[in-house]
């Protein structure tokens, strides 16, 4: 089934395969990723820049699961204030990796460490031009791959002017705003608000254990156990967003929404 929610005109389609997961239990997604590789022995890198507490332990957990899946060559891309993204050895490992997996944690920290770096430029280049390369992110690592990302907004207050914060993301998936733990943390209000602020973007709400796989030349496809929510605000009318003072409720009519489950696809082509 294909949703009729297209994106506005976007950059050329990436040649890499990109996978985003809404968080929760990652093991089934790791099995999916292992199956996308040309061989289980190729280099895999776990990027823990979003992880604020014990990133080495986070890496080790992923490495154990991948080893059980027959993937022994798993490295730790440890990027933080003491280990800069543009260190020659780090860039070399990014250049050689067949799969880079972005862990969860704090997406704002992740972007602070990567925006403006040669590392991010190389990651974009590999995604844009290298068929066979795989990039994946879970939770914060998924949110950071869109054009913009939500870093604040909770509950009913998300529908008050000033009740959310949206900042630039890594831009690997252009024209998308991705939110995670979506149904579990009742994040519908903040995504709607964010699309009033950024009406050219398509909102993608990922429930836990649920995600989307972007394959080159194919429509994005949902996988996992729960629901992906797509919200299109391009045709919203009668919005009071621009003039509403802080703390006052916002309004807008004309959102389009789709609920998608495993096997469903949607279009990234523009119908403007």
Image (cartoon, rainbow, N blue to C red):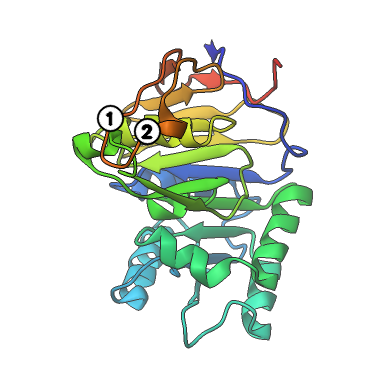
Question: Circle 1 — which element?
Answer: loop
Residue 242 x/y as whole percent: 46, 33
Q: Mark number for residue 249? A: 1
Identified at 40% across, 54% down, the residue is 140
Task: Tell me if mark 2 has few (under 14), some (14-19) or many (20+) residues whose alpha carbon lies within 10 angstroms of its own.
Answer: some
Q: Quadrant of the C terminus?
A: top right
Tell me if I can see residue 134 in this picture.
yes
How many marks can you see?
2
Callout 2–callout 1 Cβ contact below 8 Å: yes
Q: Residue 270: x, y in percent? A: 70, 21
Q: Front-most of 212 and 176?
A: 176
Residue 231: quarter of image: top left
In the image as oriented, which residue stretches furthest toward the bottom?
A: 82
Which residue is under mark 2? 244
Image x and y of residue 28, in percent = 37, 43
Is residue 26 placed above or below 191 in the rendered structure?
below
Distance from the alpha carbon under mark 2 to that under mark 1: 8 Å
Residue at point 72% right, 64% down? 122
Residue, x 33% and y 72% (percent of image)? Answer: 52
Quick one: label 2 or label 1, which is nearer the N terminus?
A: 2
Whether residue 88 sits left or right of residue 139 in the image: it is right
Estimate the x, y position of residue 209 in percent, counting from the top left: 33, 39
């Amino acid at each position: 089934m294909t949703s009729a929610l297209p994106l506005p005109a976007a950059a050329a389609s990436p040649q890499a395969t990109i996978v985003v997961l809404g968080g929760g239990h990652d093991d089934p997604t790791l099995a999916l990723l292992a199956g996308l590789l040309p061989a289980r022995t190729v280099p895999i890198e776990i990027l823990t820049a979003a992880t604020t507490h014990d990133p080495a332990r986070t890496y080790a957990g992923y490495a154990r699961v991948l080893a059980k899946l027959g993937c022994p060559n798993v490295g730790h891309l440890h990027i933080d204030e003491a280990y800069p993204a543009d260190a020659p050895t780090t860039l070399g490992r990014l250049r050689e990796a067949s799969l880079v997996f972005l862990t969860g944690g704090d997406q704002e920290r992740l972007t602070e460490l990567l925006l403006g770096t040669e590392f991010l430029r190389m990651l974009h280049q590999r995604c844009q031009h290298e068929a066979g390369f795989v990039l994946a992110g879970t939770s914060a690592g998924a949110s950071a791959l869109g054009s913009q990302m939500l870093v604040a907004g909770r509950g009913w207050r998300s529908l008050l002017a000033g009740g959310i914060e949206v900042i630039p993301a890594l831009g690997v998936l252009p024209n998308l705003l991705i939110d995670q733990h979506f149904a579990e943390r009742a994040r519908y209000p903040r995504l709607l608000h964010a699309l009033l602020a950024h009406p050219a973007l398509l909102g993608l709400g990922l429930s836990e254990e649920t995600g989307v796989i972007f394959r080159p030349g194919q429509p994005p496809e949902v996988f996992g156990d729960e629901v992906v929510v797509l919200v299109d605000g391009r045709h919203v009318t009668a919005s009071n967003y621009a003039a509403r003072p802080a703390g006052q409720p916002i309004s807008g009519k004309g959102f389009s929404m789709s609920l998608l489950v495993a096997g469903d696809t949607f279009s990234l082509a523009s119908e403007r």
